[in-house]
Image: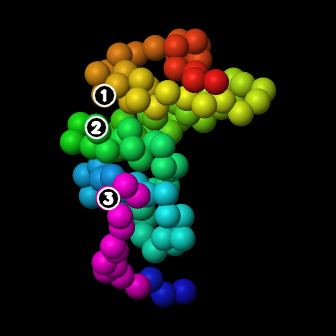
Amino acid sequence: MTTIDLKVTLQLNEEEYFKVGDHIFTKNDKLKSLEDKLHFCGSSAIKVFKEYESLLTMEIMNDWSRLIKALNQTTSCCAVWDNKKIITELVEKREHPVSWYVKNCRIC
């Protein structure tokens, strides 16, 4: 097996991505195998994260990812979460139990 370093230039529409440090988050999962610094999330999340892009760190993004997984496991059906409220809490370093997010951040 050979490892090849690959430099890739991408053209993405402004509403399809946001950056955290040297990582790119996009909804275009066709790029998944190209680079380990590409991450995937939905369009609605990208809109919210764009607002906070300059404040985001990989620690916050990892916390968000784990929290969303935990929140989704707490519901028996598909739930929609208020990513703006969640990311605001994480950026402002307010610590809450998962139950607080279930009560305060569920849209439907």
The answer to which of marks 2 and 3 sits earlier in the sequence is 3
| In this picture, residue 92 sits left or right of residue 80 | left
> Mark 2: which secondary structure?
helix
Residue type at tag 3? Glu
Q: How many marks?
A: 3
> Mark 1: which secondary structure?
helix
Q: CA separation, marks 3 and 1?
A: 22 Å
In the rendering, which numbered label is found on residue 52?
2
The answer to which of marks 3 and 1 sits earlier in the sequence is 3
Kindly identify which residue carries mark 3: 14
**Which residue: 42% across, 23% down?**
85
In the rendered image, the vertical position of residue 29 relative to residue 54, given as above or below: below
Image-quadrant location for residue 3: bottom left
Does residue 99 appear in this view?
Answer: yes
Residue type at tag 2? Tyr
Q: Are marks 2 and 1 in contact (CB under 8 Å)?
A: yes
Q: Main secondary structure of the magenta part?
A: loop
